[in-house]
Image: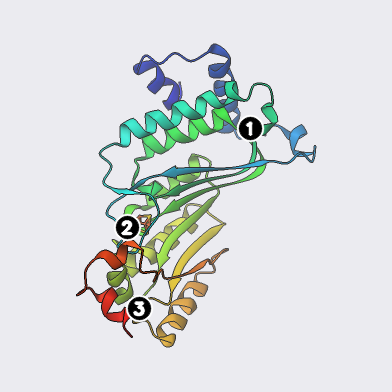
Amino acid sequence: MSLIARALRNRNIFLPKAIIDRYLKSSQRHHTGESRSPEIFHSNQPAAGIYIHIPFCVRKCPYCDFYSIAGIACREAFVHALTQEMLLAPRAYADCPDILNADTLYLGGGTPSVLSEKDTAIIMDAAFGSFTLLPGAEITIEVNPGTIDERKLKGYRDLGFNRINIGAQSFDQANLKFLGRIHSRKDTVAALEWARQAGFDNIGLDLIYAIPGQTRKSWLRDLAQAVEFEPDHLPATCSPMNLARPWNRIGPQSAFSRYRKV
Ligand code: SF4
């Protein structure tokens, strides 16, 4: 019995049999690697992209305005509500089931990698049971290098993730400290190596540029180091300097406000 089926039974949750059957059938196909709906893949019908937001982080980075909270105290309630909502989707869209066909699934946040492997497995089981991931679908998890290890990354591959997005932001320790990141350069390097060893051949590496105090030389150094790891996707975000953003509420003596005057 899969983790989600067991979790539902343990919590005395009773869903319509059709939904459970669909989930079990789909989940079984996923775990055996069997293609879900090849006929849909060739039908040229538009496919959805599924984004699942995990709103937890180890701690809040001062520049961040994504919705997330520090700590995972509400993790259990959240995972429960999320899986319930997903498992109800097939019934909600019973009249137009094609809407559940997806060619991408992205587990983002927040920091999805703060969740345990068991919780991640429950979420993925519910997703695979509720939506039809088309053959070749890109299935991504976003990770913070300070929250993973080799075993966790291998586990993600087993759960069906075929793409990983690593939030490096910078390879410069001073920049990481300034940004309030929980990870070090060493953590990022280890994450990249473990990801390759785990079998990820589609890796995204996030960087931030125009960090207050960052010189052109240090940005180019960051870029050169990132390229050395040959990521498949290298998104670079300009550091948020908008006065309305949370990192400007830290206080007049903060490093942010000092640099803002430059
Ligand atoms: S880890 Fe990412 S989502 Fe979480 S607070 Fe920092 S920038 Fe925001």
Q: Of label 1 and label 3, which has the lower sequence position?
A: 1
Whether label 1 touches label 2, CB < 8 Å = no
| Residue on which disc 3 sits | 212
For the rendered model, the colour scheme is rainbow
Name the quarter showing ligand 1: bottom left
Whether residue 232 is situated above or below residue 220 in the rendered picture: above
Residues at marks 2 and 3, CA–CA distance in whole angstroms:
23 Å
Which amino acid, mark 3?
Answer: Pro
Q: Is residue 138 left or right of residue 66?
A: right
Percent position of residue 91, x then y: 58, 20
Question: Camera-side residue: 124 or 77?
Answer: 77
Whether residue 99 is situated above or below residue 108 in the rendered picture: above
Q: Is residue 73 left or right of residue 195?
A: left
Residue 146 image label: 2
| Residue on which disc 1 sits | 100
Q: Of label 1 and label 2, which has the lower sequence position?
A: 1
Answer few, some or many: residues within 10 Å of disc 1's Cα (few below 14, many 20 plus, some between 14 and 19).
some
Percent position of residue 187, x then y: 34, 63
Circle 2: element type: helix
Which residue is rendered at x = 27% and y = 64% of the image?
249
Q: Is residue 76 visible?
A: yes
Percent position of residue 106, x then y: 52, 46
